[in-house]
Image (cartoon, helix red, strand yellow):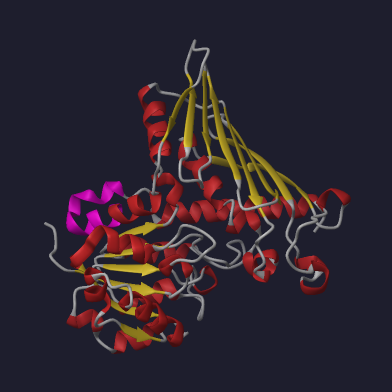
Amino acid sequence: MTVSVFNVVFAGAGGINFGSPEGPWNHSERLEKLLGERLKVLAIIDPMICVAQKRINDKLSTGNKDVLNAYAQTQCFATIEDAKESEIGTRNTIHLIVNGIPPHFRGTELKGKDADVQLMDAFPNAKAILTEKPVSASDPTVIDCDSVAEHYKNFKGATSVGYVLRYLNVVQTLKKIMKQHQIVPMCINARYIMAYEYTTKLHWWNKDISCGPIVEQATHFVDLIRYLSGSPIDHFSVQARTVEHDCPAGKLNKMGFDENALIPAEQRIPRITTASWRHQHGTLSTLMHGVALHGPDYSTEIDIVADGWLLRLSDLYQDNPKLAILKQGAREYEIICGHDDPFLTEIQAIVSAVDSKDAGEKILSSYEDALATYKMTWEIRKAGEAEQGK
């Protein structure tokens, strides 16, 4: 049954929840578009109260009647504990918590890195939680991350993790084709080449902070490979090699800051990572992530090779992602493309899970599944470092 008012709490006042020039993410904007007059934002939780208040002020200055109503009584809290003590969760039904707190502060049960657990403890009756990826920034081989997955499993409401590329129309079309024709991939080959020229946030270039480009960025492609393969990974088969900053092939000429002066050598990210592994039903998967292109545009492709089939996803971060299909016996590709907003589809899925209890199947990424992707990205990083003797 659809609820008339939809109460939301934003945990985190950063770009994932309220937008930034660096990408299309903006959960608040999608919720406003989807829910209209139903939306009521109860609170924004962020240690930078001034930032949270500015987000509210910006919303109140839009002139949009529904947005004005949504944020007219929004409260700001510096901590989850402050929000809990305010009793917003007992005086109101919280329909959705959007957990956009940076991954460095969640994904474990350690104090200061346990925001997920705090949120579920503070608001145990919330109807749903949407958590951004990656699920943590802690090394899962050193710190226990599995216990947090148990908290999510035991949470009474719906849960979802933001592996948004799963929600692309072309990805869902590809899944349907593979199911309809019982396609078992022989090989999945993924290539993710980022444009680095305008990436000047120093923490991104420091793998001790960002965890490196495989964990932080290529995680979406590792997740898609897992999602499309249909078979668990043989973790003993994982291999990786890297091109590092200190070899001629790793020299970057368009960096927007002085890396030598600002990033310690041992903390610099690899320029290229190539990885390969086998799945339990025999599929071979390869991933190449590169920090290489100039300008604003990334290059992204995933090829699936099977008996008589070549299926290619491309331009997954553009407005018009593409699926090219070379069918059995065909000589020309069939091209499927079109404008898409997977962030909106992701939001629709979690809202539907609240509005209709039998709609949870629309959620495409559970926390347990997302944790498996996270662990895999760390395996790739560590395999690359081991190959370099680090």
Work out whether 65 lies above or below 292: below
Residue farthest top in this picture: 329
Most common SS among magenta residues:
helix
Q: Which residue corresponds to the image point at 48% horizontal and 35% vertical from the top-left?
A: 322
Residue 360, magenta (yes or no): yes
* Residue 105: percent from left, percent from top: 51, 74
Q: Nearer the viewer, residue 267 or 186?
A: 267
Work out whether 198 lies above or below 180: below
Pick the quarter of the image with the C terminus: bottom right
Number of numbered discs overlaid on the protein picture: 0
Q: Which residue corresponds to the image point at 71% horizontal and 48% vertical from the top-left?
A: 273
* Residue 49: percent from left, percent from top: 43, 86
Q: Please state the extent of the stretch shown in magenta in the rendering.
A: 349-362
Query: Does the rendering let one see residue 18?
Result: yes
Q: Quadrant of residue 33?
A: bottom left
Residue 252, magenta (yes or no): no
Work out whether 240 lies above or below 305: below
From the viewer's perspective, is 174 left or right of 260?
left
* Residue 130: percent from left, percent from top: 36, 62
Residue farthest right in this picture: 248
Q: Nearer the viewer, residue 257 or 366?
A: 257
Q: Quadrant of residue 65?
A: bottom left
From the viewer's perspective, is 241 left or right of 224?
right
